[in-house]
Image (tube, rainbow, N blue to C red):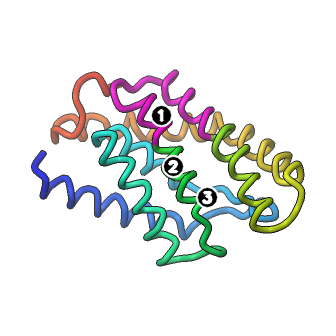
C-alpha cells in the first residue's frame, strides 16, 4: 500500500472512530459502553505497529478536542496507546478467535478496569474500589459480547481487506 493510500485509510478510520465515540451507553458514574474498539482492533490488524501506536495517540487527542466528555487527562491518551499495544501484540501477525479473546480480555481487565478506575479516582475523587467494582462488572459482562461482535464483523470484512491487499493470508480467520 502506498503512503498516500495508507494516510487516506488512516484518516478515514480515524474519522469513523471519532464519530463512533460520540455514541456510547452511560452505565454508571463515569462508566460508559463505547464501540470504538472495533476500529482500534482493525487498525492494529491492518497497519504496522508504530503506525498503529501513533494512530492511537493522535486519535485520542483528536476525539477529545472534537468532542470532550470531561477534562483533558493524559492518562486516557496512555490508555489508548496501551490498548493499541495489546491489540498489536495479539493481532498484528495472526488473527484467531483465541487471539481476539485474549487481547480483549487483557484490554478489558488491565486497561479498562485497573487503569480506568485509577484515572477516574484521580479525576473525580472517589475511592478506587468504587470505580473498580463497577468497571469490573461492566467489562466482565461485555467481554464475550465484544469478542463475538468483533469476530462476526471481522469475518464479514476480512475477504474485502484481503482482496484489497490490506491484510495477508495469516490474518484470515
The prevailing secondary structure element of the residues shown in magenta is helix
Left or right of 90 in this view: 10: left
Determine the CA span between mark 1 and mark 3.
29 Å
The picture places residue 167, in percent across and down from the top left corner, at 24, 34
Determine the CA span between mark 2 and mark 1.
12 Å
The picture places residue 57, in percent across and down from the top left corner, at 43, 58
Q: How crowded is mark 2: few (under 14 residues within 10 Å), some or many (20 or more)?
A: many
Q: Label 3, secondary structure: give it.
A: helix
Q: Residue at x 85, y 66 (%)?
A: 125
Left or right of 18 in this view: 75: right
The picture places residue 21, in percent across and down from the top left corner, at 53, 65
Q: Label 2, secondary structure: give it.
A: helix
Q: Which mark is residue 75?
A: 3
The picture places residue 72, in percent across and down from the top left corner, at 60, 72
Q: Is residue 133 highlighted in magenta?
A: no
Q: Is residue 106 highlighted in magenta?
A: yes
- Residue underneath mark 1: 151
Q: What is the magenta range?
A: 85-107
- Residue underneath mark 2: 37
Amino acid at each position: 500500500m502506498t503512503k498516500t493510500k495508507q494516510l487516506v485509510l488512516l484518516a478515514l478510520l480515524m474519522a469513523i472512530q471519532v464519530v463512533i465515540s460520540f455514541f456510547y451507553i452511560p452505565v454508571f458514574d463515569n462508566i460508559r459502553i463505547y464501540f470504538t474498539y472495533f476500529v482500534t482492533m482493525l487498525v492494529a490488524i491492518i497497519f504496522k505497529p508504530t503506525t498503529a501506536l501513533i494512530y492511537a495517540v493522535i486519535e485520542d487527542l483528536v476525539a477529545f478536542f472534537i468532542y470532550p466528555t470531561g477534562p483533558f487527562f493524559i492518562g486516557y491518551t496512555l490508555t489508548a496507546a496501551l490498548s493499541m499495544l495489546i491489540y498489536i501484540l495479539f493481532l498484528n501477525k495472526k488473527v484467531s478467535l483465541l487471539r481476539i479473546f485474549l487481547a480483549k480480555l487483557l484490554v478489558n481487565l488491565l486497561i479498562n478496569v485497573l487503569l480506568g478506575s485509577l484515572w477516574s479516582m484521580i479525576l473525580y475523587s472517589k475511592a478506587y474500589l468504587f470505580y473498580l467494582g463497577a468497571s469490573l462488572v461492566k467489562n466482565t459482562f461485555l467481554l464475550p459480547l465484544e469478542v463475538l461482535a468483533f469476530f462476526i464483523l471481522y469475518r464479514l470484512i476480512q475477504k474485502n481487506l484481503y482482496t484489497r491487499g490490506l491484510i495477508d493470508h495469516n490474518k484470515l480467520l
